[in-house]
Every structure is written in C-alpha cells, then in structure tokens.
Image (tube, rainbow, N blue to C red):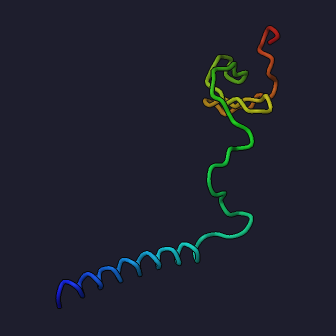
Amino acid sequence: MNEWTTAVGALVLVLSLGIGALLSRAYFAPVGAHRAQRGLSWPQALEVNDLGYCPAEGRTTLHAFHADGSRTCWTCRTITTDTTPPGGTE
C-alpha cells in the first residue's frame, strides 16, 4: 500500500462521514409546527431586569419587567400587574 491509496482512502472516509452527518441531521431533525426557528429571531416581548417594589415582600427587589407593564419578582416569583408604586403615582 503506497501513499496514494492511503490518501484516497482517507479522502473517501472523510467524505462519507460528512455526507453521513448531513443525512442523519436531515433524517432526525424535528418537523412541523413544533420545530425550532432557524436563525436569529427576537422574542415577542423583550424583558428588562430592574429594581421594583414587591408588594409580597414589602421591599424593593430585582424584577423582570414585561412589555405589557407587569413585572415578576425574581426573589418570590410574585407577578404584579399594578404598575403604580405604593403611596404615589408614577
């Protein structure tokens, strides 16, 4: 066996592994409406983390602010829909 047959054998092996990987990806990939989106997709509502008053704890804690105006406390998971702080207006 010389170097030429070794190189051709290695090339055939690499190509067959590459083609096998592509075919297995196409065969085992999920299909239908539940399939994950490809590429960059932004969520419907971006969330921002900031400090806010938590009525359940009675103090200011870190919250996830949602696009609809509600917020979720990261400490106790209380969802607050009223955006008016206690004792005043915004």
| Residue depicted at 63% across the width and 57% down the height | 38
| Residue depicted at 72% across the width and 29% down the height | 71
Residue most toward the left? Answer: 2
Residue 26 figure quarter? bottom right
46 or 4: nearer the viewer:
4
| Residue depicted at 64% across the width and 17% down the height | 60
81 w.r.t. 18: above or below? above
Q: Quadrant of the C terminus?
A: top right
23 or 9: nearer the viewer:
9
Q: Quadrant of the N terminus?
A: bottom left
Residue most toward the bottom? Answer: 1
59 or 30: nearer the viewer:
30
- Describe residue 6's horizontal placement relative to residue 57 as left or right: left
86 w.r.t. 15: above or below? above
**Image location (x, y in percent) of residue 81:** 80, 28
- Describe residue 76's horizontal placement relative to residue 3 as left or right: right
- Describe residue 69's horizontal placement relative to residue 49 as left or right: right
90 or 40: nearer the viewer:
40
**Image location (x, y in percent) of residue 57:** 67, 22
Residue 76 figure quarter? top right
38 w.r.t. 90: above or below? below
Residue 54 figure quarter? top right
**Image location (x, y in percent) of residue 69:** 79, 28
**Image location (x, y in percent) of residue 70:** 77, 29
